[in-house]
Image (cartoon, rainbow, N blue to C red):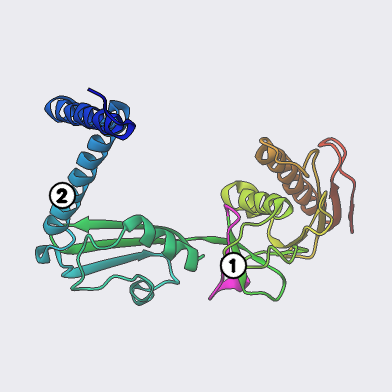
Amino acid sequence: MWFSKNDKDRNEDRRGGASRANTRREQRAGEPAFALPRIVWIPLVVFSAVAVGALLTWKTSAMLFWENPAYAIQKIEIRVDGPTLTANYVRKHMPVSEGTNIFASSLQKLRKDFLQQTPIAKSITLHRRLPGTLDITVVERTPIARLGRWGTLAVDREGYVFDLRAGGRDYPVVSGCGSETLKAGVRVDLPVMNALEIVDCCNRTKVGERVKIASLDVSQKTTIEVYLQAGERIKIGWPDMDQHDPEVRQKVERKLAALAAALRASEERGKRLVNLDLTFTDQYIPGQEY
């Protein structure tokens, strides 16, 4: 039997369609036509499980802690070690109050923010005492010198600058500082740190009983001019003082011991020391007295 060309094409289309239909049925019966590889869907499943677990953990923690009314702050106890700061100041600059949840704020952030806005504070400790007490302890910096002859800035042994609010006239004055040093909250540069070594040595050793410092001039960078309360002018210097020297304390102690000995020797001779140059070796100390 003869068929037209169109009839043959239609028969082939029918057979092809049947074949495709069979293929689709086989795919439905077996593997899906499109499947994600394991390297893709396994991480997706793990990530989803971790995300759901984290969400449940966060929600549970919120209900148990920072959304739990049982942990509302009932009392804030503040202690200040120092003469300047007050409990009211600490309370004003601490963004927590009675009635707020004790877990609602990060203690680390509270500590960091308070120290940034309060340069005179050396440290602050915050402790939660459950269920509703927050303990705060602030330790102030201890000044050992003033910066600038007419300024109200002080500096502690570690070189941190802060406002000096009262009683500053009793401290030695460090002059010749760079303008960047004369700002609360910064740390002084090396020449001022060298001057602080001298002041600290007088404070912690017996040489301070004889060496009474009125001021120190650090403008020369490689030498320090020290003026004593009785008017004596002392030039102090040592090798490598323009660098961070691990032996600076020992060098300063030797220089000041020589100064104390020179002051005592002049006094025993019935003289008064006027000038002394301690920039040379420990064996050569030129001076002037009358």
* Number of other residues with Cα within 10 Å of mark 2, as a class: few under 14, some 14 to 19, many 20 or more: few
Q: On the image, which quarter does residue 244 sit in?
A: top right
* Number of other residues with Cα within 10 Å of mark 1, as a class: few under 14, some 14 to 19, many 20 or more: many
Say which residue label 2 marks. 56
Q: Farthest left residue?
A: 70
Position of the N terminus, as image quadrant, is top left
Q: On the image, which quarter does residue 86 sit in?
A: bottom left
Q: Give the range drawn in magenta.
A: 157-170
Cα gap from disc 1 to disc 2, whole angstroms: 46 Å
Say which residue label 1 marks. 184
Q: Relative to 274, say whether 7 is above or below.
A: above
Looking at the image, residue 108 sits to the left or right of residue 177; the answer is: left
Position of the C terminus, as image quadrant, is bottom right
- Give the secondary structure at mark 1: loop
- Comparing 233 with 85, the one in front is 85
Mark 1 and mark 2 lie on one chain; the one further toward the N terminus is 2
In x, y percent, where is residue 260? 72, 48
Looking at the image, residue 154 sits to the left or right of residue 129; the answer is: right
Q: What residue type is labelled 2?
A: Leu
Residue name at image x 61 percent, y 61 percent: 186
